[in-house]
Image (cartoon, rainbow, N blue to C red):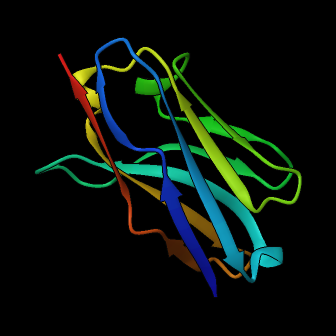
Amino acid sequence: QVQLVESGGGLVQAGGSLRLSCAASGSTSRTVAMGWYRQAPGNQRELVAIITRAGNTNYADSVKGRFTISRDNAFNTVYLQMNSLKPEDTAVYYCNARIWTGVDYWGKGTLVNVSS
């Protein structure tokens, strides 16, 4: 089991920045990748960014050049630096951890609200 707790969400004006954090605990040694997903009202949950234990990253096209995912060396904490935020970035952001068996774990989410 992996437990995930997100923090850092809030209200920000368009063009501003926020940094999300996700703290993982439990069987974190089994984690092969961690990432951020988001879900806006009426929409499906979508991938924002992922990072592997080896440090490889992947981003949704809509956030490339604006968001950066990073991790600590122990792979216990993952960050999402969000710059140049747009109203369409408004969503609940969820932290995800995938272990080597393919099982996914999710945090409860943190709300990011970007005002125009």
Q: Outermost residue toward the bottom?
A: 1
Residue for point 11% across, 51% down: 42
**In screen coordinates, is 89 left or right of 73?**
left
Residue for point 75% across, 52% down: 52
User: In this rendering, is residue 29 above or below 35?
Assistant: below
Q: Quadrant of residue 23?
A: bottom right
User: In this rendering, is residue 64 above or below 110?
Assistant: above
User: In this rendering, is residue 103 above or below 81?
Assistant: below
In this rendered view, identify the residue nearer to me: 114 or 31. 114
In this rendered view, identify the residue nearer to me: 46 or 106. 106
| Residue 49 percent coordinates (x, y) | 55, 41
Q: Quadrant of residue 33?
A: bottom right
| Residue 28 percent coordinates (x, y) | 76, 75
For the C terminus, the image quarter is: top left
| Residue 99 percent coordinates (x, y) | 69, 75
| Residue 109 percent coordinates (x, y) | 38, 60
Residue for point 71% across, 56% down: 77
User: In this rendering, is residue 68 above or below 27?
Assistant: above
In this rendered view, identify the residue nearer to me: 101 or 73. 73
Number of marks? 0
**In screen coordinates, is 93 left or right of 79?**
left
For the N terminus, the image quarter is: bottom right
Q: Outermost residue toward the left?
A: 42
Residue for point 75% across, 83% down: 27
